[in-house]
Image (tube, rainbow, N blue to C red):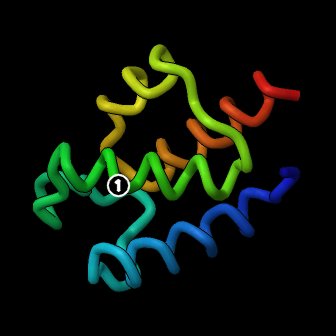
């Protein structure tokens, strides 16, 4: 997968709307505080990220994701995971 950052953001917006009923979250919004995005939601999001990437994330990479709070951080995380796999 070689998506641009804009494509990643677009896909994330779709995921947030379809899976979590969160429409157009701000890129720097704290998902946990502003949208009650909890650890169960984060696990569901990781499944969607794995689908987007086209490969499973290892346990270490999954643990790293638990501290993420904003869409910008999610984009950085996806780009990092993709670069490590390349």
Q: x%, y% of residue 38?
A: 15, 50
Classify mark 1: helix, strand or loop: helix
Left or right? Give the position of 67 relative to 54.
Answer: left
Quadrant hosting residue 3: bottom right
State the residue in front, 27 or 21. Answer: 21
Q: Is residue 13 above or below residue 5?
A: below
- From the viewer's perspective, is 11 left or right of 46? right
The residue at the point 51 percent across, 80 percent down is 14
Q: Residue at x 81, y 58 (%)?
A: 4
- Lateral position of residue 40 relative to residue 28, left or right: left
Q: Nearer the viewer, residue 11 or 43?
A: 43
- Rendered position, 26 above or below 75: below
Residue placed at 40% from the left, 32% from the top?
65
Which quadrant would the C terminus be assigned to in this image? top right
Query: What is the x, y in percent for residue 81?
Result: 67, 31
Residues packed near mark 1 inside 10 Å, few (<14), some (14 to 19) or many (20 plus):
few
Q: Is residue 52 above or below residue 68?
A: below
Residue 69 sits in quarter: top left
Which residue has dot 1 on it? 44
Total tally of numbered discs in the picture: 1
Q: Is residue 12 above or below residue 48?
A: below
**Residue 16 percent coordinates (x, y):** 39, 73
């Amino acid at each position: 997968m070689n998506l641009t950052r804009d494509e990643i953001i677009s896909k994330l917006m779709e995921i947030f709307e379809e899976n979590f009923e969160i429409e157009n979250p701000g890129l720097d919004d704290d998902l946990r505080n502003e949208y009650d995005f909890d650890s169960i939601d984060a696990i569901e999001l990781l499944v969607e990220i794995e689908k987007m990437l086209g490969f499973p994330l290892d346990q270490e990479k999954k643990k790293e994701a638990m501290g993420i709070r904003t869409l910008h951080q999610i984009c950085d995380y996806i780009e990092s995971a993709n670069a490590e796999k390349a």
